[in-house]
Amino acid sequence: MSVTTSAELSAGIAKSADLLRGRKIALLTGAGISTDSGIPAYRGEGARTRADPMTIQRYLADEAARRRYWLGGHLGWRAFAAAEPNAAHIALAEMERDGIVSGVITQNVDGLHLRAGSARVIEVHGTMRRVVCLQCGQVFDRRDVATQIESLNPWLTVPESVALNPDGDVAPESIDAFVVPNCTVCGGMLKPDVVFFGEYVPGDRFRAAESLLRASDALIVAGSSLVVNSGVRLVERARRRSIPMIIVNHEPTRADAWAHVTLAGGTGDVLPALQELLQ
């Protein structure tokens, strides 16, 4: 069942609730669930196209690319870290506490599910909250690295208002004078603890996502166009088990043909409405 109009959306939410009632529901969430928190999505209406996304190969090989990455990330960090969970995040956390949702598998790196109170969250693409040294493995809190950046670049002023990209960064005007932070333990190269383009999701993290899905008997995909292979692989596992699958996304996804219901609406409206019907 594919839903487009307002009346169809309401009917689709009701149908979804009927399919989901009495089941343990796993969530797979993408960037679309955080747009109401002020973090833009990668795709869809209003998304800012990124013609030159950072790959792990470029990050490792190109010093100028690393400077641009860290400067842009620092300029956007304050606004990114200040984003608050929205109604969709809160609805999922409350449904988990009520025993309706078994957990959340998220492709997002913003930490908003955890801040909303969800207890079982698998961040398959990592988190911007942590930074890791690629040489010695030391892990740092991103806030401490931000303090180091400010010490290394005392001339740098972070504007009060910025236009965030989906990764939480902004486009800097110039990178020439910027000094990149290094590991304070060994002097090695630092990298946010996130999966870059060209990297694989760590095996243990993907297995944890599979385990959560196996422990559930329904799946909601919320705010993801399912372009990234890790999401498609999880949806394929749900399809093979023939468990109810609901997709909530403004735009079509790669898995719409497999879904029992597709809801073309905002997660901030649909998930609280489902919560109310499933209580």
Image: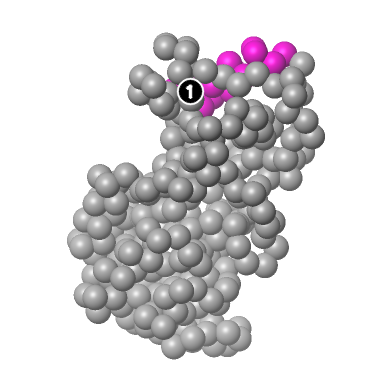
- The relative height of residue 249 versus residue 242 in the rendered view (above or below) is above
- Residue at image x 58%, y 72%? 250
Q: Quadrant of the N terminus?
A: bottom left
- Residue at image x 72%, y 13%? 154
Q: Position of residue 276 (x, y in %)?
A: 43, 69
Residue at the spot of label 1: 189
- Residue at image x 26%, y 61%? 213
Q: Is residue 133 left or right of residue 162?
A: left
- Residue at image x 44%, y 53%? 107
Magenta-colored span: 140-154
Q: Is residue 218 left or right of residue 182?
A: left
Number of callouts in the render? Answer: 1
Q: Nearer the viewer, residue 258 or 110?
A: 258
Identify the image quadrant of residue 157: top right
Badge 1 element? loop
Outermost residue toward the front in this view: 61
* Residue 30 seen in the current view: yes
Magenta includes 148?
Answer: yes
Q: Position of residue 137 (x, y in %)?
A: 35, 23
Magenta includes 207?
Answer: no
Q: Position of residue 64 (x, y in %)?
A: 65, 30
Mark 1 is on which residue type?
Met
